[in-house]
Amino acid sequence: MELTSPKIIKELLVKYETRPSKGLGQNFLIDKNVLSKIITASNLKTTDVILEVGPGLGTLTQELAKQAGQVIAIEKDKIMIEILAETLSDFKNIQIIQGDVLKIENWDLKIENYKLVANIPYYLTSPLIRKFLESENPPEEIILMLQKEVAQRICSKPPNMSLLAVSVQFYADTKIVSNVSKNCFWPAPKIDSAIIKITPRGQTSRPTGGLTSTNLFFKIVKAGFSQPRKQLAGNLLALSHAEGSKEFKLDKKEVNSWLLENKINPTQRAETLSVEEWISLTKTFNNIKINE
């Protein structure tokens, strides 16, 4: 069954009395070249276990199953589950799970040394990436097709960083594999997409030397990006510093001194800082001298 054919896609949807759901971001891939690029980026081996999120009609799932050892596909839409039972019936190495990936713990699936592959809508991007990068059992690689603008944000570098970029790059290396035209889907979305490859780093290879608190790191980063158009020093005034049983709000002098200690100009904006600079700020946070 040629699932990149708009004609066959429409016939399937009519057969099962359904239509593409905007809420679930159902835009079906109709370009074989894009399909090939995702497969190439996944660098599949016959021993690989693939976790696919949102298989839809099974277009990508079929190609993954041809080259990987096992494919576990998680689909939220109950009608798509019925369609997948038909389109994937010839494959014995595919397991289909009906559910919300954000509510399914990947270690509950009893898989290790796996790769995550997904064509995801915008609303799912940040929580999905965070879920798997922060997991006790992260994937070896993550290959996503998502909105082009979001992919560019994830892969951005100073002076164009974002909270999303820092959050992902703290855990992983990122790379845009290819841009994808909106015309490669049916129905066509309003904007273009991109294929992105995220390679998680192990605990020992993250740029975190000496960092003792991930929670403090993200607390500082979120404060820094709280008002992205404002100067960094002003945003960081919202932070508090604990000494013993007391908690103190920082003042401008203390924040400026802390930033300068890390060779960061207080007038800079959060988007100009690298992941390493945020780590440096976190490591020196407890050095701040409080003026009571």
Image (spheres, rainbow, N blue to C red):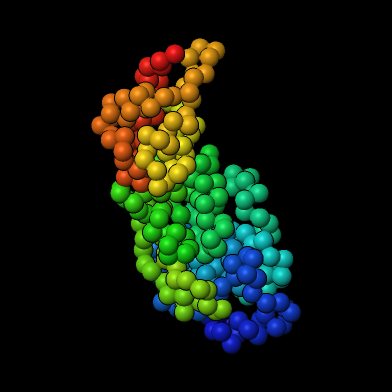
Q: Residue at x 60, y 85 (%)?
A: 8
- Please indicate whether residue 52 sits to the left or right of residue 205 in the image: right
Q: Give the farthest residue toward the bottom.
A: 7
Q: Quadrant of residue 25?
A: bottom right
Q: Residue at x 64, y 62 (%)?
A: 75
238 up-or-down from 149: above or below: above
The location of residue 198, given as percent across then percent down, is: 41, 53
Q: Residue at x 66, y 55 (%)?
A: 100
291 up-or-down from 99: above or below: above
| Quadrant (top left/top right/bottom left/bottom right) for the C terminus | top left
Tell me if I can see residue 277 in this picture: yes
The location of residue 138, given as percent across then percent down, is: 50, 45
Q: Quadrant of residue 82?
A: bottom right
Q: Give the farthest residue toward the right.
A: 17
Front position in the image: 244 or 141: 244
Front position in the image: 90 or 261: 261
Q: Residue at x 52, y 18 (%)?
A: 247
The location of residue 285, given as percent across then percent down, is: 39, 24
What is the number of callouts on the image? 0
Front position in the image: 236 or 104: 236
- Please indicate whether residue 88 sits to the left or right of residue 136 in the image: right
| Quadrant (top left/top right/bottom left/bottom right) for the N terminus | bottom right
Front position in the image: 224 or 211: 224
Tell me if I can see residue 207 in this picture: no
The location of residue 129, given as percent across then percent down, is: 50, 50
- Please indicate whether residue 231 sits to the left or right of residue 23 in the image: left
